[in-house]
Amino acid sequence: MREYWIALNSIDGLGPVRIRRLVEAFGTPHAALSAPVSLLLDKKLIPPSSGKFFHNKEELLGSARGQLDFCSKDGISVLIQEDEDYPVYLKEIFAPPPVIYVKGDLSVLRGHALAIVGTRNPTQYGINCTRRLTAELCGQTVIVSGLARGIDTTAHEHCLEMGGKTVAVLGCGVDRIYPAENKKLAERICQNGALISEFPSGTIPEPYNFPRRNRIISGVSCGVIVVEAGEKSGSLITASYALQQNRVVFAVPGPINSSVSEGTFRLIKDGAVPVRSSQDIFEHISATTFFPFLTAPPQKIRSEAPPMPTLAEEELAVWDTLSDTPARVDTIAETCGLEIPQLLGTLLSLELKGFITQTGGQQFRRI
């Protein structure tokens, strides 16, 4: 059964929303993949561009079985949403990944976690704040971050130094560590935590992968703590996803004359919880009813099928720019007047909602 999930997940033009609807319509991924292409097209369950993949389902399944074999030999667990070890909080976000790849200790995925993210170019103040918060938190919760340089690396390293458990979410396959200088750190994380990715083994790090990575960082966590972020920091994308996922966003106040305080200042101005110590975090989360923090592990919740997605104003502007002809990211950004980091998040949202597809080489077109 697992190879059918992997096969569906590998088809261009099928995002998590379309895959969920397919499986709900036919009962199992096996039945969905075996359905007549004409029926799938008539019911508008797949876009026309995906039909050719269903004609070559044996090739898809062969590739999926090869992926499973590789993962088995490399100690990588392949999880689907029905698995007990699939993170409960991740299951509750809009369009959770149908398949995730995990290397390390699966038990760290079953309880509560907090994400600590921030700039790749931190000041000593930011490093000190990260170390302090990590030391205070790691004995009571799993620390999640993205294995990037700077704040992410500091959070992972200090958590391990303090004997805590940490999870790194990657924008590539769990067998492809990025940045390369964190390979040893990744190996240590596998011994005292886990590496997670929604990308199959062998996937190289591409710029478009990282907004997807950011949504998983916030998705597996109760809340997200941002320590130092510039005005256009990728950490702000993580915070944005956290808000969409009904997570709590925390921000560490920084010196007002520092460029890496601009992002955290904006978050606090927009309603993020300012943080000086772990007490601020525990008091806020414990006061909410949505997260039974530190009292019991999260309970499995059966979600109702998500409503048909609608487009926000910015998504609609990007959608209007696109056509059936693939367009490059830089061209789309110039036409829409958006910065690349902001555009990548919008493109990801449109792809997850099933409106567009990536055709390779950082090009996108309508479905």
Image (spheres, rainbow, N blue to C red):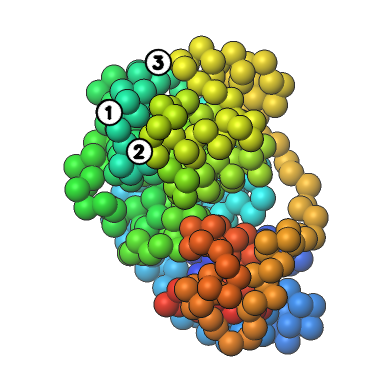
How far across and down, in percent of the image, does residue 243 sit? 64, 40
Report how far apart the C-alphas of labels 3 and 1 lie in the structure: 18 Å
Mark 1 belongs to which amino acid? Gln
Element at label 3: helix
- Residue drawn at 67 percent across, 72 percent down: 319
- Residue drawn at 42 percent across, 77 percent down: 361
Residue 126 in sight here: yes
Please give left or right for residue 186 compared with residue 313 in the image: left
Mark 3 belongs to which amino acid? Glu
- Asked if disc 3 and disc 1 are in contact, CB closer than 8 Å, the reply is no
Give the mark nearer the N terminus: 3 vs 1. 1
Q: Residues within 10 Å of mark 3 (few under 14, many from 20)?
A: some
Disc assigned to residue 124: 1
How far across and down, in percent of the image, does residue 10 sit? 50, 70
262 versus 160 height, above or below? below
- Residue drawn at 53 percent across, 73 percent down: 334
Instruction: Name the residue beneath numbered marker 3.
Output: 136
Instruction: Name the residue beneath numbered marker 2.
Output: 152
Residue 27 in sight here: no
Of marks 2 and 1, the one in the foreground: 1
Mark 2 belongs to which amino acid? Asp
147 versus 258 height, above or below? below
How far across and down, in percent of the image, does residue 72 sit? 34, 55
For this rendering, which residue is in front, 238 or 73? 238
The quarter holding residue 47 reads bottom right
Which residue is farthest front? 257
